[in-house]
Image (cartoon, rainbow, N blue to C red):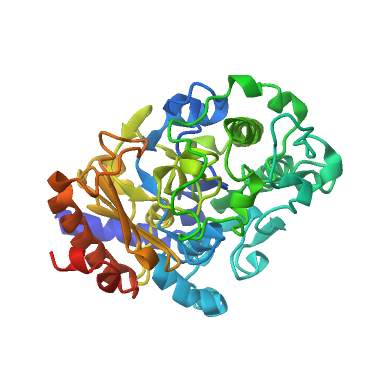
Amino acid sequence: MKQSLFHIFAVIVLSISSSAFAAEKPNILFIFADDQCYDTIHALGNDEIRTPNLDRLVSEGTTFTQCYNMGGWNGAICVASRTMINTGRYIWHANKVNADLKAEVENGRFWAEHMKSAGYRTYMTGKWHVKYDAAKTFDIADHIRGGMPKQTEAGYSRPVEGQPDKWSPYDKKFGGFWEGGKHWSTVVADDALSFFEDAKAQDSPFFMYIAFNAPHDPRQSPKKYVDMYPEDKIKVPTSFQPLYPYHNEIGLGKNQRDEKLAPFPRTEYSVRVNRQEYYAIITHMDHQIGRILDGLEKSGKRNNTWIFFTADHGLAVGHHGMIGKQNMYDHSIRVPFMVVGPGVPKGKKIDTSIYLQDVMPTTLELADLKKPKHVDFHSLLPILSGERNKTYYPAIYGGYIDLQRMVKQDGYKLILYPRISKARLYHVAEDPNELDDLFDNPDTQATSLKLFQSLLELQKENGDTLDLKAAFPHLAAG
């Protein structure tokens, strides 16, 4: 009898027109920041910063507090991160298909292509930074931006204490985010609001990919936002140091673009100013996110919309003597990740380890699509619903070119610098700021060996061919 009733129900469902059936699927609003570290949200513990609208997402939904990016195959970490998220592939698998993304799109293997196949109207605005034209994979694409606005020479190697600053985050003569008359973050919000007007007249569900260039440098915002953060009130990170001991050997020297933003060696003053401007552009972006959330509410689509917020990777901004994101410390590989949607627990925090790219298969499941074989990442719906109480990722992998590798497991993190055969070990569960290197401690040798073996397994899973055994024979020998 149950089978018969199920059969009748299936026939009825299949008889409904595809557009009407698609309209019952939830809308997806994906909001993507650039260079935003996990610890830059007030509701998640940063008392210095003002983020009332990101705080709304924390209170109205569930936050994954241990969300990571795998790294990058060149200095532009965002390219790898965004290629992974749009192809669903782990880092080195994504690097392989990066050579011919046209074939990926034409074969329906891009995120937006999957959503279109499920009846979604797809929309994108803002930063893309993927080696394929966004206008050819989204139904509608507005103001497609590159990796970053132009940073003038005046924006580098500054500020120097006691000297007049040659650059200003709110002086529009420096261009950057001010090019075109409106701040780029304002343009992104304006575009999203325009699409909501379009969506009112549509029966199809929507998939919105709203990608801010902020808070990437040049870290510019209106003066009132900068004034919210007096320089002398900004805290210097606990892990501050004038120079990272191996900065030249691991690709973080004076020729690395991100690292050139502040003077060498780092000073507490230069770090405070850089963080002042970082906080200011985040708060300005937060205001634009508030406009988007209000616009969604006014559109009448809020109750059937899932909202995801994350960033492509983090940023050092003075931690460990670094400014950029080309490193394996949590400030650069760990990001915020919030989910708001029908039935999602409110105000909940989950410390299960995930990758930010898990958002892609999560939305595919919401769209009632079976996960394609080429997608490596995993849907978070089983974790959100409580069906799965274990992580998909017992160990988290990180890699940067052939200069750095990382594995995080069981409360420890092992960082490797293969070219100089240098290793660092941190007990991050007890030392979250990653201050105390335990690698040479005899009591942690077994931990280092265990993590190294886990990293070798992760290399196989990720298609990583770098020979770590040759660089670390003492670890390989066990």
- Quadrant containing the N terminus is bottom left
| Above or below for 295 versus 332 | above
- Determine the residue positioned at 50% across, 33% down: 40
* Closer-to-camera residue (265/345): 265
- Determine the residue positioned at 40% across, 52% down: 328
| Above or below for 178 versus 397 | above
Relative image position of residue 305 (x, y in whole percent): 49, 41
**Residue 33 visible:** yes
| Above or below for 449 versus 156 | below
* Closer-to-camera residue (354/196): 354
Residue 169 figure quarter? top right
* Closer-to-camera residue (166/44): 166
Relative image position of residue 473 (x, y in whole percent): 22, 69
* Closer-to-camera residue (200/449): 449
Q: Is residue 182 left or right of residue 355?
A: right
Q: Is residue 134 left or right of residue 252?
A: right
Count the numbered circles shown: 0
- Quadrant containing the C terminus is bottom left
**Residue 17 visible:** no
Q: Is residue 436 left or right of residue 185?
A: left
Relative image position of residue 92 (x, y in whole percent): 40, 70
Relative image position of residue 18 (x, y in whole percent): 49, 61
